Image (cartoon, grey):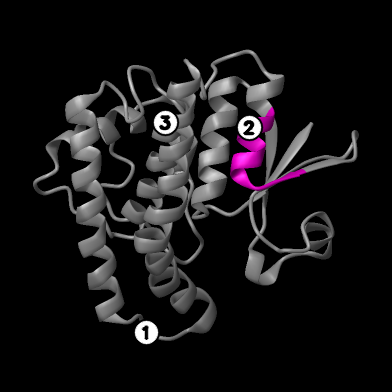
Amino acid sequence: MWQLYQFPLCPFSRKTRLALSEKGVGYDLKREYPWDGSDLFFSLNPAGRTPVLHDPAKRLALIDSQAICEYFEETTDKTPLILGSATQRAEIRRLTAFFDQAFFADVTHPLLHEKMKKRLVLRIAPDSGTLRNAMRLAHEHLDYIDWLVDNRRWLAGSQLSLADFAAAAQISVADYLGGIDWGGHDGAHGWYRVMKSRPSFRPLLTEKMDGLPPPRHYADVNA
C-alpha cells in the first residue's frame, strides 16, 4: 500500500492527493512536517520536502508532486489528467508549472510563511506588508483564471486536467489562510466552487492544521 508523507497545508501534497484520488489510487496518509521530520522521512527524501509517496513492500519512493503525477499518468489508465494532442498536453504542463511555481511563489508561500510558520514554528507576528502584497498578487492570478475560464471550458482547454488540480490545490491553501478575496472574480470563483464540489476534494476540506483553524467559509462548497 502506498504511503503519502504530507502535511495538511502543503499545496503540492494536495495536488498529489487530488490526482491520486481522481485516478482511484489508494494510499495511507502519513503526516510529516518538513521542519520537524522523522528520520524515516529524511531517509526517503534527504531534501526534506513533501510530498513523498512510498511503497515499503516495493522499496519504492516517489518524490515531487509532478514526478508522482507523471508516474501515475504513465502507469494508470483511469482518468488521464495530461491528455489530448501533444499541443494540448504541453499547455496542461505549462499551466501546471505556472501554478506550481508562480502562484506558489507570489501567494501561497508568503501566506504559509507569515500565517503558518511564524505562528506555529517561529512564534512571531506576521508581517502585514508581506500579507498585503500576497493578497494583491492573488488578485492578479485570479484575473488570469477569470480570463482562462472565460475562453475555455477548463483552465487548459476543453477537458478537466492536472492544471485545474494544481491551481485548485494552491488556491485551497491560500483560502484556508484567509488570503483569497473573490470580489470581482466571478469566473474564477465559479470554477473553484466546481472543483471544491468534486469527491476528491472533500477530504481536503475536512482536514485541519493543528493550531490553525480555517475561516468559516472554507469548507462550504457554495462559498
Q: Looking at the image, how many numbered discs can be counted on the residues?
A: 3
Residue 208 horizontal/vertical position (percent): 47, 53
Which of the two discs, 3 and 1, labels the residue nearer the N terminus?
A: 3
Tell me if mark 1 has few (under 14), some (14-19) or many (20+) residues whose alpha carbon lies within 10 angstroms of its own: few
Residue 146 horizontal/vertical position (percent): 19, 38
Q: Which residues are magenta?
A: 62-71
How far apart marks 2 and 1 lie (CA) works out to 39 Å
Foreground of the two, 219 or 113: 113
Which of the two discs, 3 and 2, labels the residue nearer the N terminus?
A: 2
Q: Which residue in the structure is indicated by mark 2? A: 70
Q: Which mark is residue 200?
A: none
Label 3 sits on a secondary structure element that is helix
145 with respect to 48 (left or right) = left
Marks 3/2 in contact by CB < 8 Å: the verdict is no
Kind of residue indicated by mark 3 = Glu
218 with respect to 211 (left or right) = left
Q: Which residue in the structure is indicated by mark 1? A: 125
Of circles 2 and 1, the one toward us is: 2
Q: Quadrant of residue 133?
A: bottom left
Residue 110 horizontal/vertical position (percent): 39, 68
Label 1 sits on a secondary structure element that is loop
Quadrant showing the C terminus: top left
Kind of residue indicated by mark 1 = Ala
Q: Which residue in the structure is indicated by mark 3? A: 91
How far apart marks 3 and 1 lie (CA) works out to 40 Å
